[in-house]
Image (tube, rainbow, N blue to C red):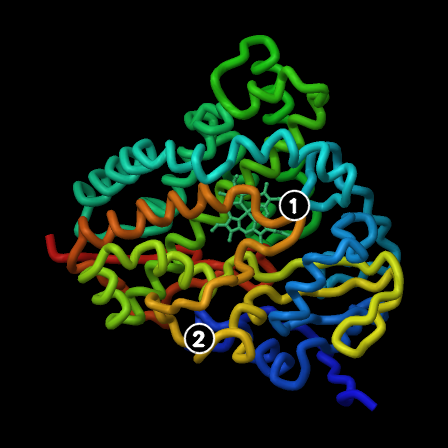
Amino acid sequence: MGEPLHTVTTLPTARQAGCPFDPPAELIDARSHSPISRYPFPDGHQGWLVTGYDLVRSVLADSRFSSRKELMRHHPLIDYGDIEVPPAPPGEFLLMDEPRHGRYRKPLVGKFTVRRMRLLTERVEQVTAEHLDAMEQAGPSADLVTAFAKPIPAVIICELLGVPYADRGLFQKHIDTFLGGEVSDEELYAAYTATQSYLAELVAAKRANPTDDVLSDLLDSDLTDEELQGIALILLSAGFDTTANMLALGTFALLQNPEQLAALRADPALTDNAVEELLRYLSVAKTFFRTALEDVELGGRTIEAGTTVILSLNTANRDPERFTDPHALDIQRQEGGHLAFSHGIHQCLGQQLARVEMRVALPALLHRFPTLRLAVPAEEVELRPETADIYGVRSLPVTWEA
Ligand code: HEM
């Protein structure tokens, strides 16, 4: 006989008051019972919730678990009873398996290597300095999200893709809408369609007049315009929202951990390590889904073919069996191997870009504003709901001595 089966009946829609950086208490509790729990979806589908580091990592590495959109219940709170989920549209390779996935990922890999991304360092420094200048001039207070965290990665991904930053009004709010997790299905669909029509025009414009960027580079391949649109959508939305939330939530976490902040200020050589620790500690891309293609033994359970498995990356990254004192933010931590960028064939394509952005922007902010602090009590900082794909703060009011 194995361990008794632990069941989680509902998943949280919010984090515990006063713990904005920790995974919801229900998930931490589930992991302490067992690295894998039963999760009955609202429509009665008997799914699983995986919270232990080793099991999450092994599912991510296992091709018997599919990312195909049409197979999975990719929202733990929705009743999928009558919903027919279509396959991911061409180009949107995050929700595909091989060989479809590789058709899109392969031509992109060489464009996001460590070396290529390091070459961007100088440009990231410039863009960061421009935003810090503007923030300083408009200060001594600011919303760090709109002044700093959002625009820096947005400018960079637009430049990489060859999307005019001046056009951002045409798609940024739509992307925010479909990633924010706070609107109805109709609004979500409208935002998605509006972004698609912008991208259709963009791809047509590149065909007519190629420029020096990742999208134009792909015009010579056998990818269709529709596929290029899908790729652009994935890259833009990933590039806009993820690093932005890490920068804002990361700053918030440092301000709330003054001894860690002081250590980083005292020794900028700790920056790379601090960035990895913030990635682990915050795990803003927190929940992913896979569907078993055949019966699979996992952690002493049989995951039946067709069953959806919810992977809690943020809980796995706080697993005490993998990380010492996992709920502490420790920028000198030497235990690598966090899963904040996932693992396996879908491991984040943009991770080297995200690292360059964080390694440049965070220390530049701290250096420019030595007296940076929250402008409101920490409890009043507005958090994104758990239903958002990417966790973070809605805004972060900060101030400093002018
Ligand atoms: C700190 C910032 C970021 C975090 C935490 C993050 C996290 C993730 C995670 C967890 C996945 C894997 C999903 C899965 O296993 O199903 C992923 C995939 C992906 N990310 Fe990121 N990401 C970040 C920044 C970026 C940036 C800046 C880009 C822009 C190029 C990007 C592009 C992608 C793409 C294209 C995929 C899909 C890869 C595939 O399916 O093969 N990400 N990201």
Q: Amino acid at mark 2?
A: Cys
Q: Residue at x 45, y 23 (%)?
A: 164
Q: Secondary structure at mark 1?
A: helix
Residue 230's tag is: none
Q: Position of residue 54 (x, y in %)?
A: 64, 70
62 sits to left or right of 245: right
How many numbered circles does the render carry? 2
> Residue 36 versus residue 134: which sits nearer the camera?
36
Q: Position of residue 373 (x, y in %)?
A: 23, 62
Q: Position of residue 41 (x, y in %)?
A: 78, 69
| Residue, disc 1 | 188
228 sits to left or right of 328: right
Q: Residue at x 74, y 51 (%)?
A: 67
In what quadrant of the picture does the N terminus appear? bottom right
374 sits to left or right of 90: left
Sequence-wise, which precedes: disc 2 or disc 1? 2
Residue 54 against residue 228 in the figure, above or below: below
| Residue, disc 2 | 19
